[in-house]
Image (cartoon, rainbow, N blue to C red):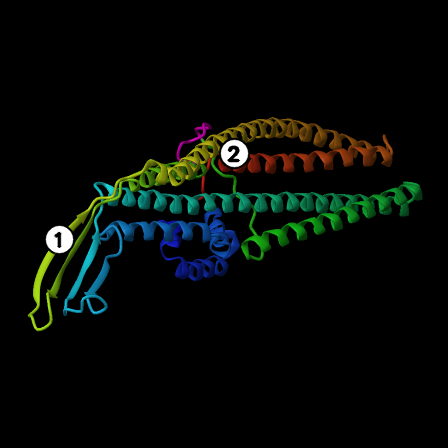
Amino acid sequence: MPILKYVQRWLPLGTLVLYLTVTGHALADTSLSEFVVATFVRHQGRELSQSERDIANALDQKAAQPLAGDPTFNLKYETDAIGSDLGYREWEGGVELPLWSPGQSREYKREAERTGFVADAILNARRLEVAGKVRDRIWMLALARGDLEQAQSALQTAQGLADDVKRRVDAGELPRSDLLLADKDVLTRTDAVAQAENRVAQAEGAFRNLTGLESAPAPRREPLPANKELPENHPQLVLVDAKVEQARAHRERVEGERRKGPNVWLGGKSFKERAGAGYDSAVGVEISIPLGSVAHAAPALAKAGAALTEAQVEREHRRHQLDEALYIATLEYQRTTEAQQRAQRRQELAEASLDISRRAFELGETDLVRLLQVQADTIDARHDQQIRQLDVGQAIARLNQSLGVIPE
């Protein structure tokens, strides 16, 4: 059984087992889908789904009843004690049974099914929402860690250069002013590392607050979707479609209730004409057929029609939103891919320039200021290349999110 269906069916047990499973394994072995499951069971947000499920169960129970309503017991007693007082007595009692009109129970059943579909669609849409949050937190943390790695690498490079400059200053090959420049660069890079560490701590806190897990591994780039058209089985589209069908079924049920079914009375009576006479008994059946009135049913029918119209408008609005989000995500993927290619070429040129500048500095053909400038450009190029690679991974994740892909 797929893990998310397991959660849906056995949520109380699944919450404990799955959460302990994810938190008990090494994070490096944890997949994106497991992060989504851990977050989903921690932030279930299933109250709306459960309320729809309760409505569906109530409608289904109603449809399964043999009668359209509760039976009514009535009892009547008549006497002439305050009139002629001849001893007339009459007892009459029976049960009134409201019957279904043709197709009425079937309309309740249909609305129950449509409401059940809405309950399932709410859960699935909620999973997609959680997946989007997890994706954003993971890639936000990855970008922060990328900044930290580059800051640490830049500090290491600056420190190595400062050590080399100090050795040459001590040997009398370079002026002491070069050592001051190198030490200043080390302090600048040290401050950059501290700032990057703070950003990583903030990103880890946001991830931990969402998932309940201490940290996340380096994200794996998601598969690039082959089809970039908005699918009809997008969880958000499925939800709004289900709500439209639910509203339509409700309107049909309300319209059907305008034609109420007949009431059947089954009972009997026992009476005597005068004092001293014996009681005579009889049984009877009575059928009453309500006359449906359009005017009396109009308010409920109009309200149900308005709910259907509102659901249809919401469906079109949501489709436009999803189309726009997909368009933006597609453009973002194209932009990040092109930017990554440019960053790759820039890094190659910067690395070549740094090699030339280092040899020139060692041979005394250039000064430290020039070398520091080239080194700073190379560090920026390396950082830009790494960040652009992460940007591409994040763009693919957002593209999958806009297409309604839930990690499995």
Judging by the rendered image, the residue that carries numbered circle 1 is 285
Q: Residue at x 63, y 42 (%)?
A: 143
Mark 2: secondary structure = helix
Q: Position of residue 287 (x, y in %)?
A: 17, 48
Residue 132 in picture, x, y percent from top left: 53, 43
Instruction: Tell me the quarter of the image containing the C terminus.
Output: top left
Q: Is residue 309 left or right of residue 193?
A: left
Mark 1 secondary-structure assignment: strand
Amino acid tagged 2:
Leu
Residue closer to the observer: 74 or 223: 74
Sequence order check, earlier mark of 2 and 1: 1
Q: Is residue 232 magenta?
A: yes
Q: CA distance from mark 2 to mark 1?
A: 69 Å
In this figure, what is the number of numbered marks?
Answer: 2
Q: Is residue 202 left or right of residue 86?
A: right
Type of the residue with mark 1: Val
Indicate the position of residue 233 as horizontal and vertical percent values: 39, 35
Circle 2/circle 1 CB separation < 8 Å: no
Which of 385/170 is in front? 385
Location of residue 9 by image quarter: bottom left
Structural crowding at the residue carrying mark 2, measured as other residues with C-alpha within 10 Å and reported as few (<14), some (14–19) or many (≥20): many
Q: Residue at x 35, y 46 (%)?
A: 116
Q: Residue furthest bottom?
A: 276
- Whether 286 is among the magenta residues is no
x then y, percent, for residue 25: 48, 58
Single out the mark in the foreground, 2 or 1.
Answer: 1
| Residues rendered magenta in the picture | 226-234
The residue pinned by badge 2 equals 399
Res. 126 in view: yes
Q: Which residue does the image show at 54% across and 29% down from the upper left?
A: 324
Q: Residue at x 90, y 48 (%)?
A: 170
